[in-house]
Amino acid sequence: MNNGRQLIFKSYLSSLPKHINGEEKVNALTFLAEGAAKCGDIASTTLSQTYEPCDVGAIIGNAFPSNPGKVNLAHYKVRKMVIDTQEQRQRYWLSIDSNVFIYKDRTNPHKYLRYSFNGVFPRTGIYCNDNPGDENWNNIKRDYNMDLKPWRSTGNHILITLQRPMGWSMRGYNLMDWLQSTFTKIRQHSDRPIVIRWHPGDWKNYPKYDAVLKKYNATISPQERHITQDLVGCWALICHNSTPSSVASIEGVPAFITDDPGYCQAGSIANTDLSCIENPNLPDRELWIKQLAQCHWSFADLRSGRCWAHMRQWVA
């Protein structure tokens, strides 16, 4: 049941690109609206590419294309329209984003995804997870047969995980410049072997970086290798702000990030000073992992209304 006034909830199916097989994402938008209706709100899906007034407009992702050439694509225009109009009207937009825990099972059998209001970074978004309960984390532990591993105090190599050169999460930072700067800082404080892990969608750009990688004698992780294999024997992981920092932290490997912590899901527990690469901070992770789990919801949570009953408190 809702608390206070009845809300108008719209899921914009038109925020999905037409050329992608997006059954999972279509279902996420559809089931989210289904759950909102079960909570007593006026909820529906729409294929419209024009704005429909609502208290909450749900979209897939955000309006930051990985390639600036995509800004004129229909689904990006819909996302930007929803975001801009909701913000102008002082209403909410809801983003459905990737699952941080999916590395444990790429089939994602329970269809967990990440949900937030008004932004996709901890600093900009509302993740409705300030005071997390235990239920979501317990469910994820059960469904993925996982738990937090103890912090590791041994290891040999340093793993650098790369993001897309044009990716929105780099926030304008040139990847080549970032990589060279990171190499230089590492070598000022450590002579450990360095392993490079490419972004799964960016292997085609590998030859462009060959000279830099040879200069610093870095080893390339094979394309088919799972990230947990790269973490075997790993002393520390370094990335700009991306998901591998959370993966490493769950697996007990200290993570270092080079971006503002407010733009990283592991920002509250990750190291930020590469001069400490040989003596990383190992903070308590209990609150962090529960907060991370609190913004992840399964399809069952969507359809039952459990997800929306929790999130609508921040709207109502």
Image (cartoon, rainbow, N blue to C red):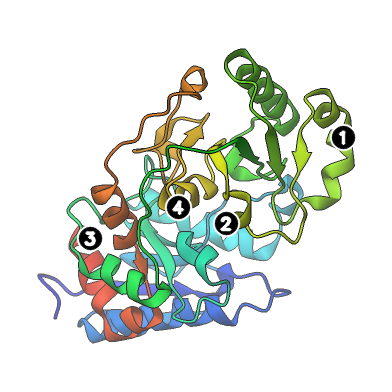
The three-letter code of the residue at mark 4 reads Glu
Would you name the residue on which mark 4 appears? 251
The mark lying in front, picked from 4 and 3, is 4
Mark closest to the chain's N terminus, 4 or 3? 4
What residue appears at the point 54 percent right and 48 percent down from the top-left corner?
Answer: 244
Residue shown at the point (44%, 55%) measured from the top left:
85
> Between disc 2 and disc 4, whose residue precedes?
2
The span from disc 3 to disc 2 (Cα, nearest Å) is: 38 Å
Pointers 2 and 4 in contact (C-beta within 8 Å) = yes
Dot 3 surroundings within 10 Å: few (below 14), some, or many (20 or more)?
few
Q: Which residue is mark 1?
A: 210
Location of mark 2 (residue): 228
- Residues at circles 4 and 3 in contact by the CB criterion of under 8 Å: no
Q: Earlier in the sequence, mark 2 or mark 1?
A: 1
In this view, the mark in front (3 or 2): 2
Percent x, y for residue 259?
51, 30
Residue 77 in percent (x, y) is at 61, 58
Residue at x-position 30% and y-position 37%: 283
Q: Nearer the viewer, mark 2 or mark 1?
A: 2
Q: Work out which residue is located at the far top of the displayed protein and give it.
A: 188
Instruction: Answer with mark 3 or mark 2, whichever residue precedes in sequence.
Output: 2
Please, what secondary structure does the residue beneath circle 4 have?
Answer: loop
